[in-house]
Image (spheres, rainbow, N blue to C red):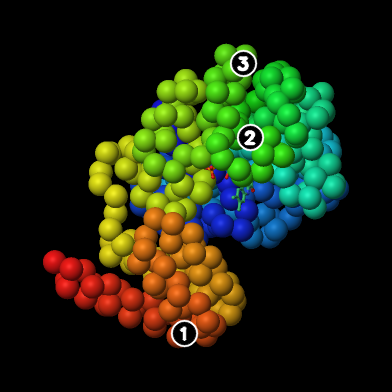
Amino acid sequence: MRLILAPMEGIADHSLRDILTRLGGIDFCVAEFVRITNHLLTEKMLLRTVPELAHGGCTRNGVPVRVQLLGSDPVCLAENAAFVAALGAPGIDLNFGCPAPTVNRHGGGAVLLAFPEQIHTIVSATRRAVPLHIPVTAKMRLGISDTSLALDCARAIEAGGASEITVHARTKSDAYRPPARWEWLAQIRETVKLPVVANGEVWTPQDYEEIRRVSGCADVMIGRGVIIRPDLMRRIKTGEEAMEWLALLPWVIDFYEQLCARMEHRHAPGRLKQWLGMLRAAYPEAEILHRTLRSERDPVAVGEMLAAGLHETSGMIKNFY
Ligand SMILES: Cc1cc2nc3c(=O)[nH]c(=O)nc-3n(C[C@H](O)[C@H](O)[C@H](O)COP(=O)(O)O)c2cc1C
């Protein structure tokens, strides 16, 4: 049974992967997609999205980070996959699920779900180009507007030689509307022999038990649930109680410090506010901090307010008891 951090472009970047994998419970991550056009990627471009490649393809905590490629041309994808493998990626994942219009307009992501033969060609070309000891995997949705080709797409991925397949149990038209169609995961698992990783709408340890029961899948990938409850994977593995806000806040500060070290300072507050905005769903205290920080753009002032939040929150907790 493996727990996998989902790729989330614009959210689960290198800094957040560092925090989440240090919090524990994650067996491996898939990084956000790298778009492949008709050029060979440069090492610099790749390291921008997956800086872990400069450290053996693992996070600071030693958790492997697979690289996800998104495109539609089998030759370009295969050549780039070979390059990514040579740079030390511990695995290569192919994206057949992204619903973004800009990506779909160029024939990549979820639109490929209408063409199982093309999916097959892409997977097999990539598999041939990458040394056998490096897994080539794929991530798909159930279809574009219906599920009629879901099993064909899964079969195409298997026939192409992928070593596992992650299924986000929704069509492109479903977007992110709950519920996810977990029953489809069982159908796909029964259709192919390769391991199927279940994905979609796991927010709590109870959801995790339920998706495994309904799908029969051993492995589960979680995205948004871990962003709003950063200890979710660890709790699933250990059965621990949920982390209190006061215990989480130093991790939020660590995240902000990493942002300031890695990006132009003026961009750091925006990324921090984005994560805080999501944390509000699980932590009322994040709501207070988010409101306090909302109009502050000065990176230094934001850092000071975060540190003050640590003191205030500890005061609040002391008063509470
Ligand atoms: C903001 C955002 C960005 C995403 N980026 C990617 C991506 O780069 N590649 C990908 O395969 N899926 C991407 N996804 C889909 C997630 O990996 C996952 O399949 C989806 O969120 C469902 O899982 P969840 O309910 O656990 O979040 C993204 C989802 C979100 C919300």
Residue under the image location 28 percent in, 77 percent down: 312
- Is residue 244 in view from this perspective? yes
Is the C-beta of the residue carrying label 3 under 8 Å from the nearest atom of ligand 1? Answer: no
Mark 1 lies on a secondary structure that is helix
Q: In this view, does 180 lie to the left or right of 293?
A: right
* Relative image position of residue 181 (x, y in whole percent): 58, 30
Is the C-beta of the residue carrying label 2 under 8 Å from the nearest atom of ligand 1? Answer: yes
* Disc 2 versus disc 1: nearer the observer: 2
* Amino acid at dot 1: Val
Q: Name the residue under label 3.
A: 192
Where the N terminus falls, by quadrant? top left
* Amino acid at dot 2: Arg
Residue under the image location 46 percent in, 65 percent down: 276
Label 1 environment density (alpha carbons within 10 Å; few <14, some 14–19, many ≥20): some
Q: Earlier in the sequence, mark 2 or mark 1?
A: 2
Residue under the image location 60 percent in, 35 percent down: 168
Q: Is residue 10 left or right of residue 146?
A: left
Q: What distance separates the C-alpha of mark 2 from that of mark 1?
A: 42 Å
Q: Which mark is residue 300?
A: 1
Q: Is residue 273 above or below residue 110?
A: below
Q: What distance separates the C-alpha of mark 1 from that of mark 3?
A: 53 Å
Report the front residue among 212 and 161.
212
Q: Earlier in the sequence, mark 1 or mark 3?
A: 3
Q: Name the residue under label 2.
A: 170
